Image: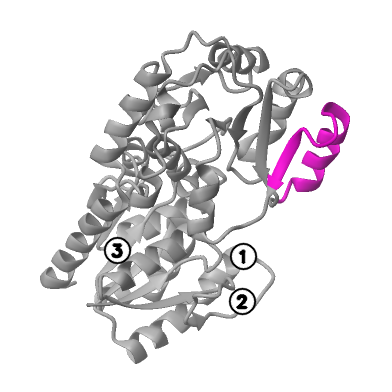
Amino acid sequence: MKILLLADGRSLHAVRYQGELQRRGLTVVFASIENGVTVDVPLRPMTGIRGLNYLLAARKIRHLVEREAPDIIDAHSASGYGYTAAVAGVSEQVPVLLHCLGSDILISAKKSTYHRMRVGTALEKSSHVIVDSHYLEAQARAIAPSMKADVVYWGAEDAVFDLHDANRELKDFSKVRPVKGLVPRPHEGVYNNQFIIRALNGLINKGKITLTFPDWGTHRKEFDALLGRECHSGTVQMYSRLPRMDYIRYLGGFDMYLSASQSDSSPASLIEAMAAGLVPIVADIPGVRELVGPDNALLFDPGNERSLRKAVAELLSGQTDVRKIINNNRNLALAQGRFSDNIDRTIAIMKQLVTDGC
């Protein structure tokens, strides 16, 4: 089976997905407007406006389909490449599988009537849609009620599950100082990283916890300025983009996973943390409730600094049943969040679409 993959060439998830398909012996032609080291066909942007570039790339996609003759097109993001494929009209020649991102449905589609139209067109023109949570499916069906869809989580590789350490279950966090927290979401407004610093600066400065953030994102400068005002030098760390296996090893060095995201749909980073045995401390929003609740995470009210401090303090008190949280998370991740299992499901959907035709 030959797959034409349309996705952001910079996306870690897209590159990981491409590599896993290739390891299964499938032929993947990766085309992208964005630069990426694994991109096969650069679709050079024609303007400085991202949304317009997706529209103008439709002609290139038509030519690419004629030249490569793929069995199926796999487009990632309804607001981006799914819309490009829809405008190109290629679903009349070859099946189009659309992978929705949480930001497509939960953020982009709500920006304006035009943005909702773009997303709706992509959903309706695709042969089949994959969403990563039942919550996202319900939100997408509110835009395109007749779409054909399956829920397939992203998940974690076996190497992430191998990080799980039984000794972590026995750790008394009232005696561990500092407790090491990972905040793996980039510095974008939706991820609310500055809120985390404002809420936890006291615990950070007292040496009770350390936090590590990515060193990228459009709001990195504002984050650095806040950090300089709120936290002692060296108490908050940054990490650069890492090769996948290096990142997995890095993940294993932390005690807790922290996210204050204001919008989410079963985030892959949360599933990875659950598989690795980190204690999740997450904002209580609908998109994560499919994965976590009081039995396997510490939840806080998004936007409420006191609520976040209380959740972290509960872990530090040593009163949290860490063994229960970690065991529940491992069982859930094994059942629903193994990347290899979910790739198998995706490939099965592709093969059925190819068999059924357009």
**Lower position in the chain sequence, tag 2 or tag 1:** 2
Check if mark 3's residue and mark 2's residue have beta carbons within 8 Å: no
Whether residue 133 is situated above or below residue 323 in the rendered picture: below
**Lower position in the chain sequence, tag 3 or tag 2:** 2
Whether residue 223 is situated above or below residue 353 in the rendered picture: above
Q: Which residue is mark 3?
A: 97
Q: Which residue is mark 1?
A: 50
Q: Residue at x 48, y 50 (%)?
A: 248
Instruction: Specify start and end residues of the magenta stretch as a single range.
Output: 218-238
Q: Secondary structure at mark 1?
A: helix
Q: Secondary structure at mark 2?
A: loop
Tell me if residue 314 is in the magenta stretch.
no
Whether residue 301 is situated above or below residue 140 in the rendered picture: above
User: Based on the displayed image, in which of its 4 quarters is residue 5 positioned?
Assistant: bottom left
- Residue 113, image x, y percentages: 52, 48
Amino acid residing under circle 3: Leu
Q: Residue at x 48, y 58 (%)?
A: 245
Q: Which residue is mark 2?
A: 45
Q: Residue furthest bottom?
A: 67
In whole angstroms, how far apart are the C-alphas of marks 2 and 1? Answer: 8 Å
Whether residue 57 is situated above or below residue 345 in the rendered picture: below
- Residue 42, image x, y percentages: 53, 81
